[in-house]
Amino acid sequence: MGEAPDPEETRPRREKDPERKGPSAWDSALRLLGVRARSRQEMRDRLNRKGFDADTVDEVMERLDRHGLLDDEEFASEWVRSRHLNSGKGRVALRHELRTKGVDESVIAEALADIDPAGEREIAAGLVERKLTASMADRIAGDRAERDKAMRRLVGMLVRRGYSQSLAFDVVGEALNALQSSG
């Protein structure tokens, strides 16, 4: 991760407020990183929310940087990989999530470039496939209104998960056509 810490730096520092109870800002930052990686802005916001003064937060941020514990590029790349594969999130949702975590737009674009369009389409198709049931095939077989209703619901599900509308319509249309032709 980085070089060995300076023994002077590993000793707990006195906070600016000697009356403050609880863990130091450094300990709080390490605990936050122990749960999951954080963006720089997210870490700063969390430390501020815990009531640490601006100078203390700045010192901790510098110290985290020196030890290589905060890296927005690595954070964004890992966030995209994990949320895309494990949660089935699309590019739109991932972009929004990273923006809310304070990640720079150029870093977001670079992280999203790692998503393979064919892989994204495959994940979207898998999500639709899980929602399609045999009873749905029976309902849409001869009823145009039921097919349109299924189309709207499935497209809506994909769009809410962050897939583009055009990809959602393509994937759902293919799935419904395949369902009708097999039924």
Image (spheres, rainbow, N blue to C red):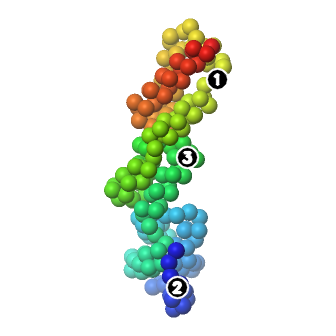
The residue to which callout 3 is attached is 85
Residue type at numbered disc 2? Pro
Tag of residue 101: none
Residue type at numbered disc 1? Thr
Q: How much space separates mark 1 and mark 2, taking CA atoms?
A: 57 Å
Marks 1/2 in contact by CB < 8 Å: the verdict is: no
The residue to which callout 2 is attached is 5
Q: Is residue 175 above or below residue 78?
A: above
Q: How much space separates mark 1 and mark 3, taking CA atoms?
A: 23 Å
The residue to which callout 1 is attached is 133
Marks 3/2 in contact by CB < 8 Å: the verdict is: no
User: Could you classify mark 2 by the number of other residues whose Cα lies within 10 Å: few (under 14), some (14-19), or many (20 or more)?
Assistant: few
Marks 1/3 in contact by CB < 8 Å: the verdict is: no
Q: Residue at x 46, y 56 (%)?
A: 77
Q: Is residue 28 above or below residue 133?
A: below
Q: Foreground: 146 or 4?
A: 4
Q: Earlier in the sequence, mark 1 or mark 2?
A: 2
Q: Quadrant of the C terminus?
A: top right
Q: Residue at x 49, y 36 (%)?
A: 121
SS label for mark 1: loop
Residue type at numbered disc 3? Leu
Q: Residue at x 56, y 8 (%)?
A: 142
Q: Earlier in the sequence, mark 1 or mark 3?
A: 3
Question: Could you tell whether 100 is left or right of 136 in the image?
Answer: left
**At which x and y percent is residue 117?**
44, 40
**At which x and y percent is residue 144?**
50, 10
Q: Is residue 25 above or below residue 167?
A: below
Q: Foreground: 98 or 109?
A: 109
Q: How much space separates mark 3 and mark 2, taking CA atoms?
A: 35 Å
SS label for mark 3: helix
User: Could you classify mark 3 by the number of other residues whose Cα lies within 10 Å: few (under 14), some (14-19), or many (20 or more)?
Assistant: some
